[in-house]
Amino acid sequence: MEMSQKIATFEEVCARSAIVIPRWLPGSTSVFWYRREVAEGRFQFFHVDCEKGTRCLAFDHEALASKLGQDSQQIQGDSLPFSWIDLDGDGSSIRFKHDGKSWKFSRDGTLTEWDGVVYEGRFDRGCDEAASPWSREPAAVTLVNQTSKRIDIIWISNENEAKFCVPLQPGRSRVVTSWLYHYWRLEVHESEPRSSVSFQLKSRRCTAVIQDSPLGLSLQWDSDPIVEGDEDITERDPTPQPEAFVQKCNVWVREPNGSTSQISHYGFKDDEFKDAYTSPDGNFAIAIQCKPASNSPLHLINVTPHDQFLPKLITKEEHLRPGDNVEVKRPRLFSLREKTEIPVDNVLFANTYIITNIGWSSNSQKYYFVFNERGHQHLRLLSVDRDGAVQVLAEEKSKTFVDYHQKSYYKLLPKTNELLWASERDNWNHIYLFDLQDGSLKNQVTKGEWNVHSVDHVDVKQRKLWLRVLGIHPKEDPYYAHLACVNFDGSSLQVITDGDGTHAWQWGPQRRFLIDTWSRVDDLPQSIVRDADTGKEAVFLQQEELVPELAGKWRPVERFHAPGRDGTTQIYGTIVYPVDFDKTKSYPVLECIYAGPQDFYTPKAFRPATGLRAIADQGFIVVRSDGMGTNWRSKRFHDVCYENLGDPGVLDRIAWMRAAAAAAAAESRPFMDLSRVGCFGFSSGGQNAAAAVLHHADFYRAAFAGAGCHDNRLGTLHWTEMFMGHPVDASYEASSNVAHAHKLGGALMLCHGGMDTVVDPACTLQLVQKLIDADKDFDLVIVPKGAHHAGETPWVEKKMVAFFEKHLQKTELL
């Protein structure tokens, strides 16, 4: 086995071995077992008692293997023919299934057939897929990947088509916005046979933890109701009440006796009522009148359809682009008793991008909703009284944009008339506590030069928040995640996790204990059990170690940080070396670039670096960093992207690379040849890579751009307007690679899939035409049946590496 393959295998096994999936014993809050991969394809079972602080083998593996192997082929203790055990609370025996029978193995070495029940756990294996129903209710799910593999997040459309949305790397989490009752598939990337789990989103806000189970992928759910106490605001009085409904584009009321009557008369096809929300007492209703979105289809040509010889036109009906009309919703208030409309001034919710229903208060006095303004500079939580008065209860505003996709959080606490609200008003994402009656600020809950990434748990009785925070330790990488808790009044902030690395955790029953796993790209994972209240270590579980045969041969991914363009702000990145690295040689540098402003992308936790190592092994130093304009630093850091997607933080990346290679640095890297620098990226990274050789060809000699949105006017409305703003103005032209095609100064290879429904292939083809018009030389790779990630297939990656070898490694080049 070649050394590169040995390293890849070690990293893969290490990532799998680091995963601790606790199987808590029924009824216990402190005892669990877990199965650990101790070598490739070899496993052991461990018994953990958190109260006693013990971890040991769950049984004598060798003795059981000997017993099972007496009448059949030899069985090894770390390759037992089962993956699940039913463990006694005191560890005196286990039960398991093998060869069609149930067995009991006791601590004294006795193996007998078992005629009782073997508890085999409870797993949510999802549901059967179906076409997503038409839904009017927005919803969001936070997906947490606790497997060792990349998970592809796939939406099942209204036409029952599986449409890839985004990837989710191991150890990472992502908020996915959706519609209530839509279907989703979570699939292990490039798994064969396919390993996946599907689910229907049945809660407006929830978390799904993706785990491995004996049956494949499984889900562990946790709900976080928008309104504490009842996700649907209130339990209705069982007494029959009038109820509003929509029919023939208008609002109607159904009386308790079943009779109906129309109470609005000005709804029509292009301005119809679509949703109605009746107050619990049946006296009032909010109805949403809607003006339709633009009809803006995406046209693709399938040149090799399976059902005919001639090419076929494929049309995706809904593909809104920047500047198109979105569906405009306007809440209207009706008295169901009087059957009349009560006027509501829309000055606080005009110019709508989206309105999200929260619902009526339990006493029917107020209706709550969230207004997101077109252009994303105002996000408001509003209430409408029974007399039509509108009140601002909380507002997030910005001269650039409000990051409602990743940082929006609100939770209503009706029993105490309070509201938890996330805001970046002090330059960092933090939680604030408001009065739900008058909208006054009671106090800032969290504060400091760090970010609240997400709310992990809200304990209303203890008035305490549990939070996933980034950058809370000043001496650590600012992207490292930790678990913290704090009281509603901002007191007693405590960081529960400890250790220089990025942390992921799993709660035990009743949140008494948690399993904390942390690592860095250059530090192998370790796991312990912590007391959830104090954060103290209860049980040490495991720490991964380098296998002896790779000692002195495995070089971990290297971390490096240095100031960016302003000479002050630290930029964090990684460096990957070839397997046969020789510091006396000179190597061209390849940057993996992706600057989508929705997140950060340089890995923080240990995970296999197989893809980048494979490229580095071709004779390159491969680097990656997050420049200004990417997410989860300060608001000012993020705002660099506003109306400026043509700048992927290249000046920060250049400064970072120069610092890494500088001879005066504490750890100089003279082997990084900055006269031979290239970059490659896909999707937003494709746009970034092309921009590098258009605007910075004095530094970047070559670029590979896969599926790039080279003119954001052709991009998707919801993503593009978030960062480029609305209306479409001169900033779109200024950020367009197409508009600057004549500036090409380096080698460029463009690639696009002909069936890409995420980024219109026209984005690349328009750039191609402008390059031809400007008499520029370039390479073009079209994958006719390829989708959005066609550029990441082995065939295209081979062409990409050959392209960089030609332009960065050949000695005959000028």
Image (spheres, rainbow, N blue to C red):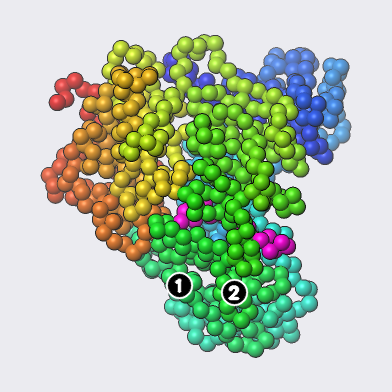
Q: Tell me, yes or no, whether the highlighted magenta stretch contains residue 326.
A: no
Position of residue 616 relative to residue 280, above or below, is: above
Residue at screen point 65% across, 84% down: 336
Relative image position of residue 461 (x, y in whole percent):
75, 52
Tell me which numbered mark, 1 or 2, is placed earlier along the sequence: 1
Is residue 248 or residue 140 the one in the foreground?
140
In the displayed orientation, state which residue is furthest to the left. 775
Judge whether residue 417 is colored magenta: yes
Task: Point out residue 792 in the picture as x, y percentages from the top left corner.
Answer: 38, 37
Amino acid bearing label 1: Ala
Residue 718 position within the rendered picture, expressed as x and y whole percent measured from the top left: 42, 58
* Residue marked by disc 2: 384
| Looking at the image, residue 172 lies above or below residue 10 | below
| Range shown magenta | 402-418
Q: Position of residue 487 (x, y in %)?
A: 68, 48
Query: Alpha carbon of mark 1 to alpha carbon of mark 2: how far?
Result: 15 Å
Of residues 224 and 256, the one drawn nearer to the viewer in this rendering: 224
Q: Quadrant of the C terminus?
A: top left
For mark 1, what is the residue? 350
Name the element at disc 1: loop
What kind of residue is marked 2? Val
